[in-house]
Image: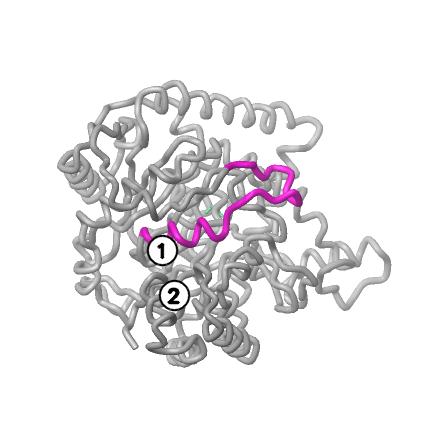
Amino acid sequence: MKNYLTISEAKKCLMSREFSAYELMQHYLNRIKNYSKLNAYVTLDEEKALASAKHADERIAKGESLPLLGVPLAVKDLFCTKGIRTTACSKILSEFVPEYESTVTQNLLNNGAVFIGKTNMDEFAMGSSNITSCFGPCFLPYRKKSKPDIELVPGGSSGGSATAVASDLCVAAIGSDTGGSIRQPAAFSGLVGIKPTYGLCSRWGMVAFASSLDQAGPLTKTVEDAAIMLKAMAGYDQKDSTSEKVAIPDYTAFLGQSVKGMKIGIAREYLEGLNEENLALLEKAKSWLIDAGCEIVDISLKTTSYALPAYHIIAPAEASSNLARYDGVRYTKRAKNFSNIDELYVNSRSEGFGEEVKRRILTGTYVLSAGYYDAYYTRALKIQKMIKDDFRNNAFSKVDLILCPTTPNTAFGIEESANMSPVDMYLNDVYTVNANIAGLPAISVPAGLSKDGLPMGVQLIGNRFAEAEIFKVSHVIEKSANFAELRKEIITI
Ligand code: GLN
């Protein structure tokens, strides 16, 4: 069996009976055991996984054909899966077994996918390193050339999904992105990760972090796989009031189409303070796009630096409200010691939430409190409007897409991350939060390696529902970067 199978390769092999879905599932379950130290998965139900693969084989034998029939995928433990424990990697949800399936996972199942298991993540998707998980950190399967003994983070919060794909413990995975949680781990892990337009994928059945920003999306080995998977996940859902009624095209049809004449904007604000390696990579990406016939346009987005502060008001505000439901009565693990209802709430929440989640709840409660609401929350919403207007008036009136870095740096050490201040950690998202604040689609595509041999990604941000353009152009970058070759140079564990 070929290693590092993509969705399209897996499908071909399954359809031509080169191997069965059952064999493929077994293969991944074995690999997961061999690589258990990576801590990519937090819940596996082998019997269920093998049974669903067997069922897929029966359907294939009957001549059925679906886009993901028999393809083993991994699911971030933020998506409710019927009858399978869903924890958001928080102690407070450690006993929660949903009675329903999230819309996104249901859509994947309807397209024939089979699930391997649930992946590790930062608690409630709050983090950029996967170190806040109650199941312990997840590890990047790569090492730096200069310091091969140092363990690195896969990024976060969808760190488990990224590691599962990068270390070939599944064909592809899904993650969620509130401020960068798909794109940052994708960049660290040499993967493709897209956060769709807000409203393209239903949020129903996803454990909510910041409802106005959360979006589901794929983490895949190739742009083509991302296009296949997004089509399968997306679609209008009446159970999500912010779901949008838009046609979902066959995104793969756009791959390989000419990008001649497309205008790609580079905002000078994204270049300020960028390190040399990132600047050089951006220059390379620019030249690939010029060679393919794109026109590069200098633009200015003056509100860029306001996005991160606004995010750290809006996201915790919504989180403090969303997480109020975890009270030790419903869903959750109840504290053993309490003598009245107030103590039950306080003790269950104090024991159940980790430090970072508590920090967000406190920040959120503070910015929503009577005396501070206008000074912080209302102001952040005004800034959000300015950022949206800025993108509309100063970017998408002039260009089709924006090219920028995904992350300020490559994967960092686990130990280093444990010693980072919260603000230093938040700075990881400086290039990714803008798209969430404005509700825009954005992708990270692997484009090169750092001097130290770690993957680096570049980001393309599009106008609302410009996913097809994003795929078209990112496919050009993927081909020009020839990352499949570069990957061979990475030190893996
Ligand atoms: N790293 C960001 C945070 O901690 C984004 C998380 C996410 O996208 N879920 O808030």
Looking at mark 1, is its residue's CB closer than 8 Å to ligand 1?
Answer: no
* Residue closest to the eye, 245 or 267: 245
Judging by the rendered image, the residue that carries numbered circle 1 is 225
Q: Is residue 143 above or below residue 324?
A: below
What secondary structure is marked by label 2? loop
Q: Is residue 404 a member of the stretch shown in magenta?
A: no
Instruction: Write down the region rendered in magenta.
Output: 223-246
Residue at image position (55%, 64%) is: 134
* Residue sitting farthest toward the right: 340
Q: Which of the pair 191/261 is nearer the observer?
A: 261
User: What amino acid is at disc 1?
Assistant: Asp
Which amino acid lies under the numbered mark 2 shown in the image of this protein?
Val
Verify CB contact (< 8 Å) between mark 1 and mark 2: yes
Q: Secondary structure beneath disc 1? A: helix
Residue at (17% x, 47% y) in the render: 480
* Residue 9 drawn at (x, y percent): 31, 65
- Mark 2 residue crowding within 10 angstroms, few (<14) / some (14–19) / many (20+): many
On screen, 173 above or below 424?
below
Q: Can residue 205 be seen in this view?
A: yes
Q: Quadrant of residue 29?
A: bottom left
Q: Quadrant of the C terminus?
A: bottom left
The residue lying furthest to the front in this view is 63
Q: Name the residue under label 2.
A: 171
User: Residue 83, image x and y in percent?
Assistant: 65, 68
Which label's residue is closer to the chain start, 1 or 2? 2
Task: Give the residue at x 51% y 41%.
Answer: 200
> Is 245 within the magenta?
yes
